[in-house]
């Protein structure tokens, strides 16, 4: 199931699935483009939820990254 309507903020912690809270895998990294997003897929075989993680520029600027 794809969830491109909702976007989840990416921070300095590893991304987890918003549905089951398990670890996720980056399947497409567009953080170097103007979109500044990553597409993740849940590692859980029963869930396999695909979602978009958005990089928060203000957060990274605050950290000095």
Image (tube, rainbow, N blue to C red):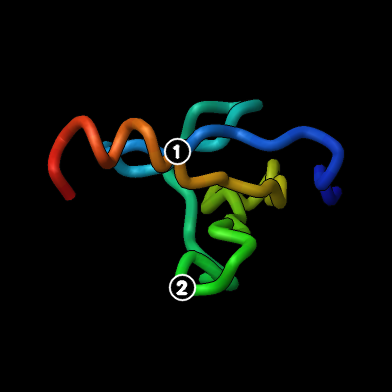
Tell me: residue 51, above or below residue 28. Answer: above
How busy is the neighbourhood of tag 1: few (under 14 within 10 Å), some, or many (20 plus)? some
Q: Position of residue 21 (x, y in %)?
A: 50, 27
Q: Earlier in the sequence, mark 1 or mark 2?
A: 2
How busy is the neighbourhood of tag 2: few (under 14 within 10 Å), some, or many (20 plus)? few
Reading the image, the residue beneath label 2 is 32
Residue positioned most to the left: 64
Figure quadrant of residue 40: bottom right
* Alpha carbon distance from label 1 to label 2: 13 Å
Q: Where is residue 42 in the image (x, y as percent from the top left)?
A: 58, 49
Q: Residue 44 versus residue 62: which sits nearer the camera?
A: 62
Numbered circles on residues, count:
2
Image side of residue 36 versus residue 15, left or right: right
Q: Position of residue 51 (x, y in %)?
A: 69, 47
Q: Where is residue 16 in the image (x, y as percent from the top left)?
A: 46, 37
> Which label sits on residue 56?
1
Q: What residue sits 59% from the left and 72% below the top?
A: 28
> Which label sits on residue 16?
none
Q: What residue sits 85% from the left and 48% below the top?
A: 1
Q: What element carries label 1?
A: loop
Q: What residue sits 77% from the left and 33% below the top?
A: 6
Figure quadrant of residue 34: bottom right
Q: Is mark 2 on a helix, strand or loop?
A: loop
| Tag 1 and tag 2, C-beta contact below 8 Å | no
Q: What residue sits 46% from the left and 73% below the top?
A: 32
């Amino acid at each position: 199931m794809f969830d491109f309507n909702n976007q989840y903020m990416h921070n300095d912690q590893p991304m987890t699935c918003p549905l089951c809270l398990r670890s996720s895998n980056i399947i497409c990294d567009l953080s170097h483009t103007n979109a500044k997003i990553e597409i993740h897929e849940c590692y859980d075989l029963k869930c396999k939820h695909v979602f978009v993680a958005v990089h928060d520029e203000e957060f990274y600027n605050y950290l000095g990254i």
